[in-house]
Image (cartoon, grey):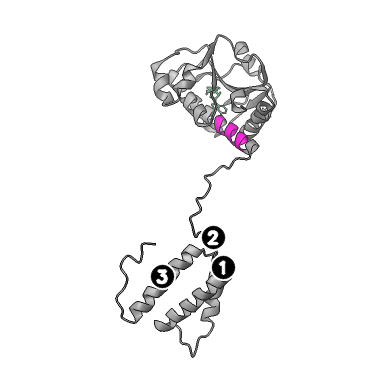
Amino acid sequence: MVLENIRVVLVGTSHPGNIGGAARAMKNMGLSRLVLVDPQDFPSEEAVARASGASDILESAQVVATLEEALVGCRLVMGTSARNRHIPWPMLEPRECGVAACEQAGQGAQVALVFGREYAGLTNEELQRCHFHVHIPSDPAFSSLNLAAAVQVLAYEVRLGWLAAEGLPLKFEAVVEAGDEPVTADELESYFVHLEQALVQIGFLDPLKPRHLMSRLRRLYGRSGVTKLEVNILRGILTETIKAARGEPHKRGSTDV
Ligand code: SAH
């Protein structure tokens, strides 16, 4: 599985709540492999609480002493940074990071996304262990995201990359109701007959002086992409309109369509 080849590495995290928040963010996006490098406080109840239903990710998290251990076997390592560092390094946009991660992971390679400490980020030495750096383009005047929020953003980008690679949709498929298909020309024709009849009945259309009313209405309906179901509703309204104009009693529950 592609997403199983992508690990999230948190280096020197001080707040266990952020580890829990990161686990939740990962699970939301289908990621499951969490590696913790020298966490200050783990395992922790606070991490479990913040993980909500993602405590399985905390239970299976691997705890290691150094970044080197966390990166064993990785062919692609991407390190995140809230700031621009002094030594220029190959940079990827978050979106490119998601695509690259899925591309490599899809070929069976191990991929790591590395995140730094809450107070100090990643050291220059740690950043130099990464093939690419990724910066989330935040406001330069307040550029540092909460650690779990940064994991969320990149986990989401990975998900976008994965969905695209799998050819899966980004939105729920619209539910097609029965009768939701477009109306046919002949059905629309009989609707126009009904409509004209109603308009005459209520005195809106004078059959002796019809002007361009029906052609304008035809043009309007032609533009609307009206469906069979909608034409049935409109016809129900016309039937009741004609009855009302004739002073006949109206049908109860006619709006229940
Ligand atoms: N004071 C630290 C901020 C660290 S925030 C510093 O200036 O580096 C904790 C971690 O969240 C960072 O190490 C990084 O992994 C991630 N992060 C926060 N904001 C980010 C951003 N805008 N782009 C990429 N990663 C970010």
At numbered mark 2, what does the secondary structure look like: helix, strand or loop?
Answer: loop
Region rendered in magenta: 155-163
For residue 104: magenta?
no
Q: Residues within 10 Å of mark 1 (few under 14, many from 20)?
A: few
Q: Residue at the location (60% across, 40% down)? A: 168
At numbered mark 3, what does the secondary structure look like: helix, strand or loop?
Answer: helix
- Extreme top residue here? 65
Q: Nearer the viewer, residue 250 or 208?
A: 250
- Residue 88 lies in what quarter of the image? top right
Q: Identify which amino acid the numbered label 2 is placed on.
A: Glu
Q: Residue 144, can we see it?
A: no
Q: In the picture provided, is 188 more to the left or to the right than 89?
A: left
Q: Identify which amino acid the numbered label 1 is placed on.
A: Thr
Q: Residue at the location (44% across, 18% down)? A: 16
Question: Which residue matches tag 3?
Answer: 236
At numbered mark 1, what does the secondary structure look like: helix, strand or loop?
Answer: loop
Question: Which residue matches tag 2?
Answer: 181
Which of the two discs, 3 and 1, labels the residue nearer the N terminus? Answer: 1
* Residue 51 locus on image (x, y percent): 43, 24
Which of the two discs, 3 and 2, labels the residue nearer the N terminus? Answer: 2
Q: Residue 49, can we see it?
A: yes
Q: In the picture provided, is 186 more to the left or to the right than 21?
A: right
Q: Nearer the viewer, residue 81 or 36?
A: 36
Q: Which of the labelled discs sits on residue 184, or is there none?
A: 1
Instruction: Count the labels in the image.
Output: 3
Q: Which of the labelled discs sits on residue 98, or is there none?
A: none
Q: Identify which amino acid the numbered label 3 is placed on.
A: Gly
Callouts 3 and 2 close, C-beta under 8 Å: no
